[in-house]
């Protein structure tokens, strides 16, 4: 079969997520050809094209989307720009893979989901493609812990701590669409759903305990108006009790710990980095009272990526491999995740228990 010809919106010669993760991921998976890119200007696109060996370069994402040699448009820019870049690609009949979050709001995500056709879209919820987490899901399904009784998860956000890095100030305010709730919590909730099932009902508490943080460039104190603490508890669809606590910043003690307890055993997941959905994971389990390291079977991993689990492109590459099989979450799935985020927000605002399926 002919390779899928990819055009990346937001690939810069100066680096960034597209360069760090998507370019090496595409190179690692047979069946793709990085054919085009667009950047903030025609000149910057030309420079990026020379750096990455991409033949078609554009200063306008609409031109990229309409080009006949582009089959798949990958959108890897800041969230507020997503809708304006995705809609022309959908109108051109192209496949679209958007990085997460899909939209800045539930309403915007709904509009994009309604504009998409079946099989046309995918979103970058990389936890669903991580070999270790897919193995964890199957361990639960195959009865490793018996009936799941409860699960507890504590994690850091990486950002939203005591200081803000250069170029990340947009994450401090809700209109940027990139908050502790919409990024780390969303990835956490979606992975929880994949492994154990979603929330039947939940209660949430959110707070901004650092209303001012330090700008790492200027040293000035700047306002932060999004929550940097999120605590959610509730009942999963299968009846298990769940408790999640996400904290802004990092911790020298625990940046990611997920425990699953059942009638027959226990499973524990640790991550090497707060961004668990793109970092190296460690699984341990016990059915005897002693936790032991669980190796992920080789059938879950692309052989060419063996030993590369610490690289940011590792789970992205597995996502691209699954995309070839039509096995990635689409914009409709993104809308369901955004509904969970909306439920968390409504619960925190009202102090009541909320059913995520009820908008």
Image (cartoon, rainbow, N blue to C red):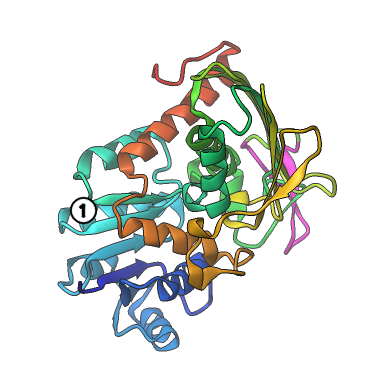
Q: What element carries label 1?
A: helix
Q: Give the range drawn in magenta.
A: 210-226
The answer to whether residue 200 is left or right of residue 160 is: left
Q: 63 or 217: which is nearer to us? A: 63
The quarter of the rendered structure image containing the N terminus is bottom left
Residue 281 vertical position relative to residue 203 in the rendered view, above or below: below
User: Can residue 167 be seen in this snapshot?
Assistant: yes
Q: Residue at x 74, y 42 (%)?
A: 212
Q: Residue furthest top?
A: 352
**Residue at the disc numbered 1:** 90
Residue 221, image x, y percentages: 76, 49
On whether residue 225 falls in the magenta region, the answer is yes
Q: Which residue is drawn at 16% across and 54% down?
A: 91
Q: 133 or 154: which is nearer to us? A: 133
On whether residue 13 falls in the magenta region, the answer is no
Q: Residue at x 63, y 37 (%)?
A: 225
The answer to whether residue 219 is left or right of residue 58 is: right
Q: 357 or 16: which is nearer to us? A: 357
Dividing the picture into quarters, in which one does residue 54 lie?
bottom left
User: Can residue 204 be seen in this snapshot?
Assistant: no
Q: Which residue is drawn at 67% across and 26% down?
A: 264
């Amino acid at each position: 079969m002919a390779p899928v010809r990819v055009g990346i919106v937001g690939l810069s010669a100066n680096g960034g997520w597209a360069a760090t993760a998507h370019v090496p991921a595409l190179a690692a998976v047979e069946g793709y050809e990085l054919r085009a890119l667009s950047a903030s200007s025609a000149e910057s696109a030309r420079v990026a094209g020379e750096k990455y060996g991409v033949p078609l370069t554009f200063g306008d994402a609409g031109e990229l989307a309409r080009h006949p040699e582009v089959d798949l448009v990958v959108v890897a820019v800041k969230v507020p720009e997503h809708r304006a870049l995705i809609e022309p690609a959908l109108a051109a009949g192209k496949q679209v893979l958007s990085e997460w979050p899909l939209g800045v709001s539930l309403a915007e995500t709904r509009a994009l989901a309604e504009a998409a056709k079946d099989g046309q879209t995918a979103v970058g919820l990389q936890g669903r493609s991580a070999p270790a987490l897919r193995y964890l899901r199957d361990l639960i399904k195959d009865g490793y812990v018996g009936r799941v009784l409860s699960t507890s998860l504590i994690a850091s956000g990486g950002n939203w701590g005591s200081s803000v890095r250069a170029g990340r100030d947009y994450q401090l305010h809700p209109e940027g669409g990139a908050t502790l709730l919409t990024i780390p919590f969303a990835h956490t909730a979606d992975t929880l759903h994949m492994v154990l099932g979603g929330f039947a009902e939940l209660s949430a508490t959110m707070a901004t305990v650092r209303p001012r943080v330090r700008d790492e460039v200027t040293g000035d104190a700047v306002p932060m108006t999004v929550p940097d603490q999120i605590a959610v508890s509730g009942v999963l669809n299968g009846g298990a009790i769940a408790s999640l606590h996400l904290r802004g910043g990092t911790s020298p003690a625990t940046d990611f710990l997920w425990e699953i307890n059942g009638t027959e055993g226990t499973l524990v997941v640790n991550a090497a980095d707060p961004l668990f959905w793109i970092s190296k994971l460690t699984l341990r389990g016990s059915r005897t009272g002693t936790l032991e390291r669980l190796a992920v079977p080789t059938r879950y991993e692309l052989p060419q990526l063996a030993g590369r689990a610490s690289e940011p492109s590792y789970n992205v590459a597995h996502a691209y491999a699954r995309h070839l099989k039509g096995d990635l979450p689409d914009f409709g799935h993104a809308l369901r995740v955004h509904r969970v985020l909306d439920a968390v927000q409504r619960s925190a605002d009202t102090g009541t228990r909320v059913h995520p399926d009820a908008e």
